[in-house]
Structure formats: structure tokens, C-alpha cells
Amino acid sequence: MAGAAPRHEAAPSSSFGPADVGATLTTAKITFLTSGEDKDNNTTLSIKVVTAAGKTAASAFDTFGKFGDGSVVPVSLLVRRNITWDALQGGNLRLHIEPNGDDTWKFGYRLDLTFDDGDVSQTIVNRISMSEDNKDHTHAIEF
């Protein structure tokens, strides 16, 4: 039909983003892999997934007990409602520790974010060291 606008089909889903625009975050889990130096049982750990606008999307806060050398510890995060994949673009993961005295913790982690369209984002970071002198770690969420 002359003068009609061309039709565009939706692009196929890629492994880097959700198949559905506006997909919402349904679950968030971080798995810590401790290597070399453990996290003491009385060191408090704050975990936050933060949107690009600075809004907390998912979080957890506790001592979670001791993370011994060689341990693999999964932690489920409390997810806020209506956080979209789009809002998390440019967002980050923030870790903060409050040791009771001296504590050096050497670890890596895998952050899994699952969306209501079934897609999963994984952020994997190795070789982090946190201590009473280095209490904060921030890393961009990877899609």
C-alpha cells in the first residue's frame, strides 16, 4: 500500500536483556564464595541492589553468621515491587560491612537477578577484599 508506514517486527530476544520491555524484577540472590580470609560471625553485612536513579531495588542486612574459608553462602534479597529491567540499567550492587573489631574478608560473588519474563542477569566478581579499613564495595550490575 503506497504511503503506508513500514511494519517493524520485534527484534529477537537477546541474552543481554529481557524479551519483554518493562519486565519486572521478581527475585534477587547473591552467592558469596569465601577464599583466603573468612567473614567473622559478628560482622554485619549490608547488601543493596540500587537502580540508576538511586532507589533500592533489593536488599538484605544481617550478620548471616560466619562465612568460613572455602564456603559458598547464598543470600536471598528482599525485592521491592515494580522495579523494572529498564530502571536497573546503570544500577549497581553495594556491599557494606561493619566488623566488630578487626575482620578481613576475601571473597567473590555472583548476583542473580530474575525477571518476570524468565530472563536472568548475572553479575560475577572475583577477588574482593573488605575489612575494617575498607568497608564499602560498589560494582555495576551486568546485563
Image: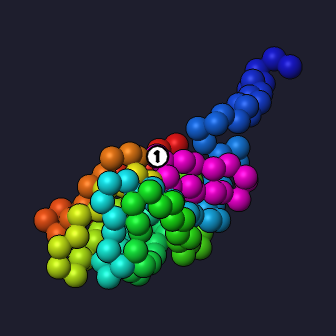
Please check the rendered image and state whether residue 66 is part of the magenta-colored stretch, yes or no.
no
| Residue at the (47%, 61%) spot, across then down | 71
Q: Residues within 10 Å of mark 1 (few under 14, many from 20)?
A: some
Q: Is residue 51 left or right of residue 133?
A: right
Q: Residue at x 38, y 45 (%)?
A: 126
Q: Is residue 18 above or below residue 39?
A: above
Q: Quadrant of residue 36?
A: bottom left
The extreme top residue here reads 2
Residue 35 placement (x, y as % from top left): 37, 53
Q: Position of residue 22 (x, y in %)?
A: 63, 54
* Magenta stretch encompasses residue 116: yes
Rendering colour mode:
rainbow
Quadrant in the rendering for residue 26: bottom right
Q: Is residue 138 visible?
A: no
Magenta region: which residues? 110-124
- Which amino acid, by three-letter code, is at mark 1? Ile
Name the residue rendered at 36%, 79% in the picture.
41
Q: Is residue 5 above or below residue 85?
A: above
Q: Position of residue 25 (x, y in %)?
A: 61, 62
Q: Nearer the viewer, residue 85 or 73?
A: 73
